[in-house]
């Protein structure tokens, strides 16, 4: 009788053999001449279904720095990645992996969690696409913090090393142990300790004071258009009506908790950089009296910027984002769900409940290095939870060639991003003059 093959070994070997047809060195390639579309054309296409009157705010935030441009131009990098060879080893992608898309938030048990926390572009795709984007972001963020290039590259190396190391640690582990794996050293990592301390202070009561004003009949949202404006009339009614279908996206016991809250007021809020122009509503609710506020974000979700290049079976874009988030995160927002208003799909989640993220210009070389290392572990866990760790480990193998290839790509692509940013700024200045 023939010995039965170990499926783990077989899957690992198939992925390892892929290195012969697609050597890791080939992942380092970047060639600007491959572009058949201009950056301007890609950005214009991304404005589809967005509010045109907010485009100037988005572009202003992108023009502020190369890293700001990078945050707002995920559509450009998605297109560029589609032009290059890839492993086809799929996991759930964050899609917009960059250093400020990780942060703290409150879990179902009230404890603070640090994890990837932005999934607007999430989709299933080649695992290394997230690595290429995150590594590029580390280089750009380090330069924005005015760190020396050697320190910036060292941080990128720490990210890739931590990712590879944890992937190989996961390889022999039971599946459920991988699914519930936690990174326990967060409190000892200086920049993350600061994030957690900031998140501890970011209470719903603090948000109440920040976003609302007190009147004799109760609190209502402040008005600071176009960044924040109260919503009234039919628009308000449509937003509140969307909470009924949203309930069905929640687990039954969470529906019960949510139904204990009373709707108080609605506002429209401009958020982020890449998200500017998408419709984003805030609903202020009150639970057990005025000292029990809850703020929900109802955020429009369009198709992922990768959808033109990867299969995307999602019919509801809010559900796509929620499913991707749950696939990659150890624990998600307990009120995470989705709904629809008119012709648009929306993601629903708590707004800024104990949320916080890294402040780029405060980072010192050692801070960035430590932070990047944790980013590597978080992304490795997300990919291992949602993909096949045997395939990823098989292709990475010893790790050195793979890591060097991703870093070389990121160095070239960060320079490309800086070039694109300067041209973007010059074009805006030329139009103004």
Image (cartoon, rainbow, N blue to C red):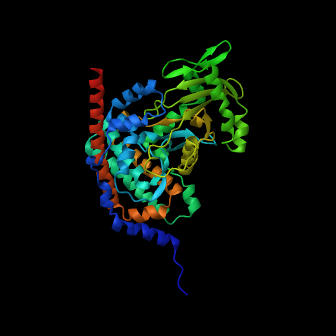
Q: In the image, is 201 to the left or to the right of 433?
A: right
Q: In the image, is 267 to the left or to the right of 292?
A: left
Q: In the rendered view, would you say 268 is above or below 339?
A: above
| Residue 39 in the image, given as x and y percentages of width and height | 33, 38
Q: Is residue 369 visible?
A: no
Nearer-the-camera pick, 341 or 87? 341
Nearer-the-camera pick, 14 or 109? 14
| Residue 322 in the image, given as x and y percentages of width and height | 57, 44
Q: Can residue 11 be seen in this view?
A: yes
Nearer-the-camera pick, 112 or 1? 1
| Residue 243 in the image, given as x and y percentages of width and height | 66, 33
Nearer-the-camera pick, 388 or 36? 36
Q: In the image, is 236 to the left or to the right of 65?
A: right
The C terminus - image quarter:
top left
Q: Which residue lies furthest to the top in this view?
A: 216
Q: In the rendered view, would you say 319 is above or below 230?
A: below
Name the residue located 48 percent from the left edge and 23 percent from the top edge.
Answer: 227
Q: In the image, is 6 to the left or to the right of 37?
A: right
Q: Count of labels shown? A: 0
| Residue 57 in the image, given as x and y percentages of width and height | 41, 26
Name the residue located 29 percent from the left edge and 37 percent from the top edge.
Answer: 420
Name the residue located 56 percent from the left edge and 64 percent from the top edge.
Answer: 174
The N terminus - image quarter:
bottom right
């Amino acid at each position: 009788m023939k010995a039965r093959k170990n499926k783990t070994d077989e899957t690992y070997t198939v992925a390892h053999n892929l290195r012969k047809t697609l050597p890791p060195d080939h992942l380092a390639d970047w060639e600007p001449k491959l572009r058949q579309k201009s950056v301007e054309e890609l950005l214009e296409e991304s404005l589809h279904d967005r509010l045109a009157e907010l485009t100037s705010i988005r572009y202003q935030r992108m023009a502020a720095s190369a890293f700001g441009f990078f945050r707002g131009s995920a559509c450009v990098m998605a297109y560029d990645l589609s032009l290059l060879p890839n492993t086809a080893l799929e996991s759930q992608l964050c899609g917009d992996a960059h250093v400020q898309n990780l942060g703290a938030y409150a879990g179902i048990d009230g404890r603070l969690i640090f994890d990837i926390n932005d999934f607007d572009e999430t989709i299933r795709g080649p695992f290394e696409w997230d690595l290429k984007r995150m590594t590029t972001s580390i280089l750009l963020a380090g330069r924005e913090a005015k760190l020396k290039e050697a320190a910036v590259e060292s941080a990128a190396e720490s990210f890739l090393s931590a990712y590879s190391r944890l992937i190989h640690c996961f390889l022999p582990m039971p599946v459920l142990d991988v699914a519930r794996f936690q990174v326990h050293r967060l409190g000892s990592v200086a920049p993350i300790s600061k994030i957690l301390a900031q998140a501890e202070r970011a209470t719903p009561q603090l948000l109440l004071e920040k976003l609302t004003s007190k009147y004799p009949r109760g609190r209502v949202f402040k008005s600071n258009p176009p960044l924040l404006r109260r919503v009234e009339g039919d628009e308000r009614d449509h937003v509140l009506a969307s909470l009924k279908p949203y309930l069905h996206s929640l687990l039954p016991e969470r529906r019960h908790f949510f139904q204990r809250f009373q709707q108080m007021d609605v506002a429209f809020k401009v958020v982020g950089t890449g998200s500017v122009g998408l419709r984003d509503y805030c609903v202020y609710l009150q639970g057990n009296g005025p000292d029990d506020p809850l703020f929900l974000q109802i955020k429009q979700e369009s198709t992922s910027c990768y959808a033109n290049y990867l299969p995307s079976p999602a019919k509801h874009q809010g559900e796509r984002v929620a499913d991707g988030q749950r696939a990659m995160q150890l624990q998600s927002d307990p009120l995470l769900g989705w709904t629809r208003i008119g012709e648009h799909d929306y993601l629903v989640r708590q707004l800024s409940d104990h949320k916080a993220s890294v402040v780029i210009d405060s980072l010192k070389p050692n801070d960035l290095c430590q932070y990047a290392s944790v980013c590597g572990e978080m992304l490795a866990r997300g990919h291992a939870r949602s993909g096949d760790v045997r395939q990823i480990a098989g292709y990475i193998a010893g790790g050195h060639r793979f890591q060097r290839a991703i870093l070389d790509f990121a160095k070239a692509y960060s320079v490309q991003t800086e070039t694109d940013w300067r041209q973007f700024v010059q074009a805006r200045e030329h139009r103004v003059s």
